Amino acid sequence: MSAITSYLKSLALLELLGGMRVTIGYFFKPKFTIMYPEEKTPKSNRFRGLLALRRYPNGEERCIACKLCEAVCPALAITIDSEQRDDGTRRTTRFDIDLFKCIFCGFCEESCPVDSIVGTDVHEYHMEERSESVITKPQLLALGDRLEQQLAADRQQDAPYR
C-alpha cells in the first residue's frame, strides 16, 4: 500500500509544489541588497583584515624577531629571517606573509609581545598575479605607516582588555 501512495505522491509532484511555495514566499519579501561601492556593510569590531607591521614613534620598527608569530601560525603563512645588529638587538631582515595561506585567525597578533603585527580593517585588496600574494616587510611597514593613527586609536580603545 505504501508503494502505491508514494507513487501517487510522486506523480502529483507534491515536492515540486512545496519548493515553489517557498520560492514564491521569498519572491514577495523585501530584499536586503546593498549597493557595495557606495554602501558599506557594518563590520564587527573583532574583524581581522589585512595584517600590518607597526613602528615606534621614533621611527624604529617594533618587531624584535622573536619569531613567536611564525611559530604560532597554524597555516605556516609567516616567514621570518633575522640578524643581530651591532648594538646587540635582533631585527628582521625578512618578514613575509603569504596571503593565500593566511587564514586571518589573529594568533600572530595575540602572540606578539611588542604589538608589532596587527590586523587592520582593510579588506578591499586584490592580486593580479600569483607573486603578489606574498606581502613583504616593506609593504607591511608601509601599510602600518599609512594606518598608524587608526591602529593607535584602536589599541588605545582596547587597552582595558589587554
Image (spheres, helix red, strand yellow):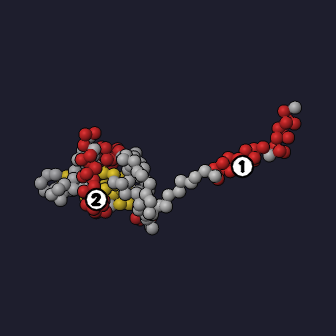
Q: Nearer the viewer, residue 133 or 109?
A: 109
Specify the farthest residue to the bottom: 128
What is the number of the mark on residue 147?
A: 2
Amino acid of disc 1:
Met
Instruction: Give the quarter of the image for residue 147.
Output: bottom left
Q: Indicate the quadrant containing the C terminus: top left, top right, bottom left or bottom right.
A: top left
Q: Residue at x 87, y 36 (%)?
A: 4
At x 30% / y 54%, what residue is drawn? 80
Give residue 3's position: percent from left, percent from top. Answer: 85, 35
Q: Which residue is most to the left?
A: 87
Identify the element where label 1 is drawn: helix
Q: Secondary structure at mark 2?
A: loop
How many badges with numbers are in the image? Answer: 2
Q: Is residue 43 left or right of residue 118?
A: right
Q: Earlier in the sequence, mark 1 or mark 2?
A: 1
**Position of 37 compared to 155: left or right?**
right
Q: Are marks 1 and 2 in contact (CB under 8 Å)?
A: no
Instruction: Give the mark toward the camera: 1 or 2.
Output: 1
Kindly report the distance in space between the C-alpha atoms of the residues bearing marks 1 and 2. Answer: 50 Å
Which residue: 26% across, 46% down? 157
Q: Amino acid at mark 2?
A: Leu
Which numbered circle lies on residue 98? none
Q: Quadrant of the N terminus?
A: top right
Q: Which residue is mark 1?
A: 20
Nearest to the observer: residue 20 or residue 147: 20
**Observer able to see residue 144:** no
Q: Is residue 126 among the parts visible in the rendering?
A: yes
Of the pair 122 and 95, the residue shown nearer to us: 122
**Toward the viewer: 25 or 60?**
25
Within 10 Å of the Cα at label 1, are there few (<14), some (14-19), or many (20+) other Cα atoms?
Answer: few
Return the x and y of residue 144 as percentages of the image width and height: 28, 58
